[in-house]
Image (cartoon, helix red, strand yellow):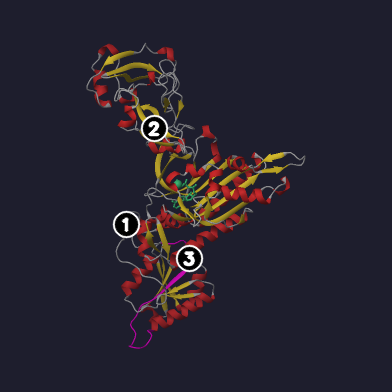
């Protein structure tokens, strides 16, 4: 097949779009692959549509290979279906809601667990029917609070979602493992560099949830990798090594200290070090910082206070906390929230009284049992020293709360952790019986008994993957597609002057090459436009087909130039050998 650029619905742009924050967004717009219709909502132009379809096709083939079957649900869903699972409330402002002419409420589905569960329930009854895995490739809608970076975080986007239905845990594990392999194949075929990261901590169930992350400088996700073992986790789930537990009775009695005018950890530490009676020196790491947050159950009208304790030399990572508390909402408490609990003395909050006044207190695992701290004394201008976990206060639990930093230690092997940024391109997750319980999805067993089905849920960001590939492969001249998803295999670029009213020799030769390549099964883009050589070269680089064939001056010697877009390498090839040379390439 040959597509002529003179006929192609394409306008490339010489300037960056004003709203482009990341390279993939910039190049996809400039190369005429996508156009913005509204914030987070994009139109796919012919070249973009071909890449999107190619990604979807790779996903489809690998899902089919593990025996999953493709279905297609509507995007427009009546409200009751999401209410039965409780998610109408969970999603809060994150979903688009609408009403029909009879005032019946609908939503545009952000994801489809409910519908898959109901479909299987309506069709299957016996244990003999199971297991089954269904998937769809479909447009999803989420009213993201911050749509950004073009296709990377859209409000309308294409996702492959699949769900496995099994009779028991062993079956679920197999479905999960099959998906993991399928995803490895998918992302390898897409030419992506990716990591598989734990998305929940070991304490919450180990490998039951993993994310596929494409490392990228401008990715929104941060993840952690150990230099010594293969441990990789997103920062929400990461477990870092904590110091050993201590004996609570090994510390002196706690004492209250006068510490006026110590608004920061540094000023407090200076004051402590000017108190020789404490018998030691202190650093920020010896202080316990208590940060007041608030949480709200899904659908609940009011917020509850939550205090989180971390070593004073560490920052609190609210996103990390939020990831672990989901679907419970969490936010920083403001002055109004604090005013409702006068026993919390701003700047001097300590955990000693929190349990007594009914305020939930969680600590980062770095605040190990038996450890002693300098912390607020719950009185204006006073701190307390030798305040011991397990003696002077008992937290309600632990939560990974500190901002992870380079050099933190791996909880598995003690190796050094480094932080990197990435794009979440896929997620596999053992959902268990949450939706089967909500919709009473049961199979009848061999003895007539009822078996509650267990589910897995698996997503690939299909449109996001287009941008992720662009993000990882683009260079300073534009897009660079891997052959597996490029809109065309070969871009044929004739450059040369023609006599008025005639075709140039180069164009004639280029037409022949294009026809021959097409006959050999290549998808060919031919730049038959009446444009300058500079313009054609710039566009060929910008559009990013894997191979560019330049038919120019060398034609006089019976040669063309074959350029590899990725490496930039150019080779002269005899006209007669072009087809065989390129056929051997991909
Ligand atoms: P994120 O944390 O990035 O918001 P998520 O956890 O909400 O993602 P899932 O609900 O697991 O994502 O969706 C499955 C996949 O769909 C994700 O792994 C991601 O690749 C893609 N995806 C999710 N939200 C968006 C979006 N707003 N725009 C484009 N792709 C998205
Ligand atoms: Mg999301």
Q: How far across and how far down the image is residue 460, in percent?
A: 51, 52
| Residue at disc 2, secondary structure | strand
Tell which residue pokes out farthest to the left in this image.
Answer: 261
Q: How far across and how far down the image is residue 59, in percent?
A: 54, 57
Residue 441 lies in what quarter of the image?
A: top right
The label number, if any, that marks residue 19 in the structure image:
1
Q: Residue at x 32, y 72 (%)?
A: 535
What span is in magenta?
Answer: 480-504
The label number, if any, that marks residue 294 in the structure image:
2
Q: How far across and how far down the image is residue 160, in percent?
A: 53, 54
Q: Residue at x 69, y 47 (%)?
A: 130
Q: Is residue 332 left or right of residue 196?
A: left
Residue 329 lies in what quarter of the image?
A: top left
The label number, if any, that marks residue 50 in the structure image:
3
| Residue at disc 1, secondary structure | loop
Beta carbon at label 3 within 8 Å of ligand 1: no
Q: Residues within 10 Å of mark 3 (few under 14, many from 20)?
A: some
Which residue is nearer to you in this view: 408 or 286? 286
What secondary structure prevails in the magenta region? Answer: loop
Q: Is residue 529 left or right of residue 441?
A: left
Tell which residue pokes out farthest to the right in this image.
Answer: 447
Cα–Cα gap, marks 3 and 2: 46 Å
Q: Is residue 318 above or below residue 558?
A: above
Q: Is residue 574 above or below residue 408?
A: below
Q: Residues within 10 Å of mark 1 (few under 14, many from 20)?
A: few
Quick check: can you spot residue 16?
yes
Residue 481 highlighted magenta (yes or no): yes
Cα–Cα gap, marks 3 and 1: 24 Å
Marks 3 and 1, the one that precedes in the sequence = 1
Q: Nearer the viewer, mark 3 or mark 1?
A: 1
Callout count:
3
Mark 3 and mark 1 in contact? Answer it, CB < 8 Å: no
């Amino acid at each position: 097949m040959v597509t002529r650029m003179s006929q192609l619905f394409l306008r490339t742009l010489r300037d960056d779009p004003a709203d482009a924050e990341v390279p993939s967004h910039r190049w996809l717009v400039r190369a005429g692959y996508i156009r913005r219709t509204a914030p987070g909502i994009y139109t796919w132009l012919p070249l973009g549509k071909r890449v999107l379809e190619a990604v979807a096709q790779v996903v489809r083939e690998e899902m089919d290979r593990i025996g999953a079957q493709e279905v297609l649900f509507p995007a427009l869903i009546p409200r009751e279906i999401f209410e039965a699972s409780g998610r109408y409330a969970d999603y809060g402002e994150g979903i688009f809601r609408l009403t029909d002419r009879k005032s019946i409420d609908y939503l545009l589905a952000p994801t489809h667990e409910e519908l898959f569960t109901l479909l299987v329930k309506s069709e299957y009854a016996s244990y003999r029917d199971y297991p089954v895995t269904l998937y769809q490739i479909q447009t999803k809608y989420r009213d993201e609070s911050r749509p950004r970076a073009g296709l990377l975080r859209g409000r309308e986007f294409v996702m492959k979602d699949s769900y496995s239905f099994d009779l028991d845990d062993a079956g679920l594990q197999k479905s999960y493992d099959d998906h993991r392999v399928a995803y490895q194949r998918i992302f390898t075929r897409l030419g992506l560099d990716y990591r598989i990261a734990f998305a929940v901590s070991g304490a919450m169930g180990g490998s039951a949830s993993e994310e596929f992350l494409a490392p990228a400088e401008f990715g929104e996700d941060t993840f952690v990798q150990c230099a010594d073992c293969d441990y990789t986790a997103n920062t929400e789930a990461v477990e870092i090594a904590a110091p050993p537990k201590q004996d609570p009775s090994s510390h002196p009695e706690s004492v209250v200290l006068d510490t006026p005018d110590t608004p920061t950890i540094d000023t407090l530490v200076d004051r402590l070090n000017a108190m020789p009676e404490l018998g030691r020196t202190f650093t920020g790491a010896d202080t316990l910082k208590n940060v007041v947050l608030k949480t709200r159950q899904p659908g609940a009208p009011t917020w509850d206070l939550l205090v989180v304790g971390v070593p004073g030399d560490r920052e609190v990572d609210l996103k990390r906390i939020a990831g672990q508390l989901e679907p419970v909402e969490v936010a920083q408490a403001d002055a109004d929230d604090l005013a409702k609990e006068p026993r919390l003395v701003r700047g001097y909050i300590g955990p000693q009284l929190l349990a007594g006044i009914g305020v939930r207190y969680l600590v980062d695992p770095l605040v190990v049992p038996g450890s002693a701290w300098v912390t607020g004394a719950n009185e204006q201008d006073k701190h307390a020293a030798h305040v011991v976990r397990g003696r002077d206060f008992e937290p309600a639990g632990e939560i990974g709360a500190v901002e992870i930093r380079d050099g933190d230690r791996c909880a598995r092997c003690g190796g050094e952790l480094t932080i990197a940024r990435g794009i979440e391109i896929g997620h596999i997750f053992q959902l268990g019986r949450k939706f089967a319980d909500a919709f009473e999805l049961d199979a009848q067993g061999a003895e007539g008994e009822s078996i509650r089905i267990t589910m897995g849920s698996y997503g690939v960001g299909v449109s996001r993957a287009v941008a992720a590939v662009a993000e990882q492969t683009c260079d300073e001249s534009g897009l660079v597609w891997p052959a597996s998803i490029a809109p065309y295999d070969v871009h044929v670029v004739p450059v040369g002057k023609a006599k008025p009213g005639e075709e140039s020799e180069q164009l004639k030769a280029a037409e022949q090459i294009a026809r021959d390549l097409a006959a050999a099964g290549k998808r060919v883009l031919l730049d038959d436009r009446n444009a300058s050589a500079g313009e054609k070269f710039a566009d060929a680089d910008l559009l990013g087909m894997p191979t560019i064939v330049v038919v120019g001056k060398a034609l006089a010697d019976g040669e063309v130039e074959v350029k590899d877009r990725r490496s930039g390498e150019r080779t002269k090839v005899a006209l007669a050998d072009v087809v065989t040379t390129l056929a051997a390439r991909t």
